[in-house]
Amino acid sequence: ERATATRRGFEGDRTAQVVDEDGMLCTPRDGANEKLFRVRPEIIDGGKTLRLTSPPGEDNGSNPPLAINLRDVVEKGEVVTVEAMDTPGVKLRDYGDDAARWMESATGIPGCRVTGIGGGDEYGRAGAGKPDQGDAGSGGGAPGSLP
């Protein structure tokens, strides 16, 4: 398999992330958010659309697939500031109320929002790095990948 590197990281990486109602990044490794593992994201239409699907279940009913026009998000999505693991102040694009309702229905995470790296210049963070992995960080506000 192959991956394309861009100035923001690997193409398609961090296209969608879920944050809770307090703006904290949600990870399925946290038992309270494990239903995120059931959500299946797929980038289609040559990178123009993000499709989200989840299997129907007794606790989330029938959640039909949702298609998100990524170009609309880049142009119209609100810039929000979230807490990404141990990194405060990461700026991402909010994917709107329809995506938030869909994700809450699929996962049961109250008040969650779907966010991602937009196409504007708003994204960036001063990376503290991961010294245990030989990464000293970016220091002065250079874009970096999220933890």
Image: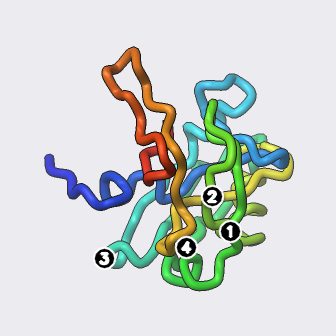
Q: Tell me the residue that label 2 is attached to.
A: 91
The residue tagged 4 is 67
Tag 1–tag 2 contact (CB < 8 Å): yes
- 45 relative position to 16: left or right: left
Which is more N-terminal, label 2 or label 1?
1
For residue 54, the mark is: none
Q: What x and y, as percent, mark residue 3?
A: 21, 52
Q: Residue at x 56, y 37 (%)?
A: 37
Residue at horizontal 31 percent and vertical 76 percent from the top: 46
Frontmost of labels 2 and 4 is: 2
**Label 3 Cα neighbours within 10 Å, binned few <14 / some 14-19 / many ≥20:** few
Which kind of residue does numbered mark 4 sit on? Ala
Percent of width and height locating residue 74: 54, 78
Residue lying furthest top: 132
Q: Which element is circle 4 on?
A: strand
Q: Which one is in front in this view, the residue at disc 1 or the one at disc 3?
A: 1
- Using a 10 Å C-alpha cutoff, classify the residue at mark 4 as few (fewer than 14 neighbours), some (14 to 19) or many (20 or more): some
Closer-to-camera residue (90/100): 90
Tell me where residue 86 sits by quadrant.
top right
Residue that protrudes farthest toward the front in the picture: 140
The amino acid pointed to by label 3 is: Gly
**Residue appearing at x 14%, y 47% in the figure:** 1
Between the C-alphas of marks 1 and 2, the distance is 6 Å
